[in-house]
Image (cartoon, rainbow, N blue to C red):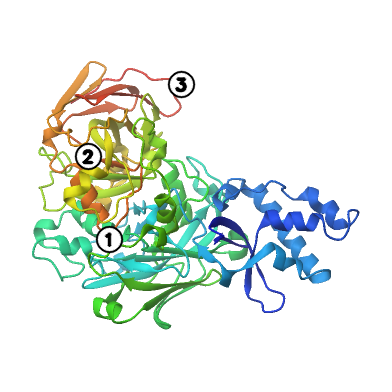
Amino acid sequence: MKLATFLHENSERWGFVMPDPVTSAPRIVEPARAEAALSTSGGATSGYAASRASFLGDWPGTLADFLALGDEGMAVLSRLEQFLTRFIAQSDATLLGTVSHAVADVELLAPIPRPRLCLGLVSNSPSFARANPRVGHLNLFPVAHQRPQGSIVGAGAAVLMRNGHHDPVMSFNVELGVIIGQGGRDIPLHEAMRHVAGYTNVTDVAGTYYYGRVPGNAGRGYSLPPEYGDWFFQATASWGGKIADTLCPVGPFLVTKDEVGDPYDLLVYTRQDGLRRDRAHTSATILGVERVIQWYSSFATLQPGDILHLGTLGVDGLPIPREVIESREVVIESEIEQLGVLRNPVQAVPVGERVPFDRHPSYAIRRAAQEPPTDAAAWHPRDARHVFTAFGNHAGSPDEGLPRLEIPRFFTGPATSLGADGSRVVLPARATVVDVTIELAAVVGRLASDVDPGEAESYLAGYAPVVSLCDESFRDAVAEPARLGERHIPAVYGRWGDGFNVVGALEPRAGTWRGRRMRLEVGDASASGSTDDYLDGAAELLATISAVTTLFPGDVILLGRTAATLRLPATGGVVTGEIEGLGRVRAEILRAGADGPTDGEASV
């Protein structure tokens, strides 16, 4: 089956795709409407009415919620689709028009328009290693980034290049998207495919905004001077350019895995304005679906509707010069055999011109624009959709000894890495040592896009203390000689576990975060520091990120690791952190399989 999400009368709907019996044009059938119509067609004693018991009755409101029903829900939907097909062929073909919508008449959204997780792999093609003398062998774990909801758009929606993000060039390529059906944690390799609902096209778009922000580097494209050559800034420049609004088209449909067959035997095409730019094959990956699912679920829970896209399958980043984009509307296409064609226009937004939220191509941003500002008193970590973390943001340089740069280093992480005060945090089974630190967090108060640095503080709802964990066992998977990404990304992944960043109560005091003592305690061990040691504050980070990426109400900005860090064995323990004037936060760390916390010895 092909499943789709769309807008009808400003309401999010979903359904399965069927051809029009006259024109063969695709139509989207809403399951609830189809079941209701069939139950009243052909007479109360007919087989049609009697078959109603084999359907679902109460259909979920979103496709992600439907996927949570697992294989049983998919089987019921398949029965409904087959039954409706027979009814249209044998009895009344006009019924299709009453329970469906022509794709051409609706706004087709991404199959999962507001995914909790959109994880994109990099350096996952054999071409990265085939003739590279710096690659002696490959580490079999993913190097990946997390995309926010504002980056997701559906087929036909505009890809917007704003603030000169396409100067001097933008790039794009096609990637295989994997959509999770049944969620899970610690999924074995041989069971990974059971958790896949289906596949979709993903167009991976990137721009050069953060490269051009480097002093003296404007107009040089995807290159950096040596002083900006550390991996953490390289990833900020590259991945920060990928997470921008609208730069991740997904769709047009979710094609269920039974219809695809072998996901590693599909031809792939990339086009610009109808002309082919590249041809590739889905077997051209180093890590496949199974290993990515096994790896991610080893430290965090996969949930229905999560999207994994596996990296370029051909040329990494087909360039389109600024002059071409600004001279006319460019159309980019990604096609994967059996999955359809994903087509999107590219539009340059003049520097300084704002895109109205209520007409934004991103459905997630339009929805967020209708929400009230963050209520500091009522905010809870589950309200966050995105987490942005700074690296190398401390005078003591606890992150790999990174020097201060003109532009903050930052990464996007999954919101499920946040936990509430008093949470129990369960370490992965492989964990041996965990670094624990007390950090400062800021919560975004309202939708923030292209925010002026002088106004950025006013976009914050308040500050809170955070006890943050970093699982050091990720480093054990790195075998040298490793690539820079493989060597350094454990510092990022180590913070992504479920509830690994435990946030205290939000204090609505903008502009008062500096000059506060910080203290961390684990058993008899303690460490202390000061918020004065941060190089950049949340306002600077918000202004930097929002230049091309919209932050949502309730999102969290973590200012990063500090010198107030303790190293704790994975036996567990009770951790208490405090920031002067912002309150205390407490977390219980449990080893995998433990029923309760134990007292562990910590070292500073």
Up-down relation of residue 511 to residue 41 (above or below): above
Up-down relation of residue 512 to residue 3 (above or below): above
For the N terminus, which image quadrant?
bottom right
**Label 1 with label 3: CB-CB less than 8 Å:** no
Toward the right, the furthest residue is 45
Q: Which residue is mark 2?
A: 560
Q: Which residue is mark 3?
A: 595
**Amino acid type of the residue that numbered disc 2 sits on in the rendered structure:** Gly
> Which residue is drawn at the image coordinates 46% and 49% (left, top)?
293
| SS at mark 2 in the image | loop
> Which residue is drawn at the image coordinates 46% and 67% (left, top)?
282
Of the image marks 1 and 2, the number of the one nearer the N terminus: 1
Q: Which residue is mark 1?
A: 241
Residue 76 is situated, as x and y percent measured from the top left of the image, at 71, 52
Left or right: 603 in relation to 478: left
Of the image marks 1 and 3, the number of the one nearer the N terminus: 1
| SS at mark 3 in the image | loop
Left or right: 311 in relation to 82: left
Q: Closer to the camera: disc 1 or disc 3?
A: 1
**Label 1 with label 2: CB-CB less than 8 Å:** no
Q: CA distance from mark 1 to mark 3?
A: 43 Å
